[in-house]
Amino acid sequence: MMDVLKILAAFALGYLLGSLNTAVIVGKIYGKDITSHGSKSGGLTNTLRVLGRSAAVFVLVGDVLKGLLACLIGLQLGVYVQSGQAIDCVSLLAAGAGAVIGHNWPVYFGFKGGKGALTAVAVLFMVDWRMALICLGLFVLLVAATRYVSLGTICATLLFAAISFIPAFSHTVYFHIFACLMASIVLFKHRENIQRLLSGTENKLTF
C-alpha cells in the first residue's frame, strides 16, 4: 500500500510541476497569451514563432527543468522493481508521465498547454538516456532535412515506443506502459499537425 501511495504522490507532484507551463508564463511576461496566437500551442515552437528566440530560450530551459525536477522527485520516492536502476523506478516513470500530462493539460491555465515534446525529452533522458539519444538523433536529422519540427517529433516518439520493446534494453512491463502512454499523448496532441503534414500545409521551421 505504501508503494502505491508513493507512486500516486509521484504522479501528482509531477503533474503539478508540469502544469507550470513555461510558454504561457513567458507569454504573459511578454504581454501575450501564447495560446491565442500562432498555432495556439503553449510550447517551444509556437513561442519561437510568436515571441522570438529570447523568449524561446526561457521556455526551453523551463520545460527541461520541470521534467528533470519531476523525475528527481520520483527517484527520491524510490519505488523500484527488479534491478533498482533508474529504468526500473516506477515512481520515476509516474512522476515523468505526470509532468508531461501537466504540460499538456495544466491545471493552472485552464488545461490549455503545449504538446509535451520538450518536457518528454527531458523525462526520457532521465529514464533511459540511451534510448533518448537515439530518438533525439532521429529528430535532429529529420528536422534538418525537412524543417518540419512536428514530423521529427512524431517519428522520434514512434521510435521510442518501438525500441522500448527491444530485449537488449531490459525494460519491465511498467516501462512499456510508460512508453506507449507517452507516445499516445504526443501523437494525440500532434493530430492536427499530422493532418497538415498529409495535406502539405504544415509550417516549416525558419532559421
Image: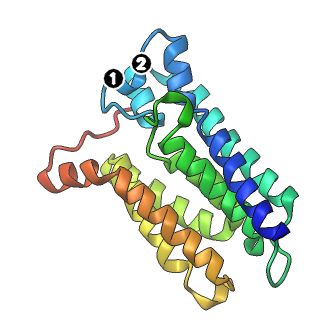
Q: Which mark is residue 36?
A: 1
Q: Is residue 87 left or right of residue 42?
A: right
- The residue most toward the top is 31
Write the residue at 67% across / 61% down: 94
Query: Is mark 1 in CB contact (under 8 Å) with mark 2?
Result: yes
Distance of label 1 from label 2 (alpha carbons) = 6 Å
* Circle 1 SS class: helix
Occupied quadrant, residue 81: bottom right
Residue 151 relative to residue 72: left or right: left
Q: Residues within 10 Å of mark 2 (few under 14, many from 20)?
A: some
Examine the rendering and report whether any part of residue 54 can be seen. Answer: no
Point out residue 13 in the picture as x, y percentages from the top left corner: 72, 46
Whole-percent x and y of residue 193?
27, 49
Q: Is residue 193 above or below residue 65?
A: below
Residue drawn 41% across the image and 18% down it:
33
Q: Residue at x 76, y 68 (%)?
A: 4
Question: Horizontal placement of 113 versus 18: left or right?
Answer: left
Q: Mark yes or no: residue 49 visible.
A: yes
Q: Is residue 111 above or below residue 71?
A: above
Q: Secondary structure at mark 2?
A: loop
Which mark is on residue 33? 2
Q: Count numbered badges in the picture.
A: 2
Q: Nearer the viewer, residue 50 or 143?
A: 50
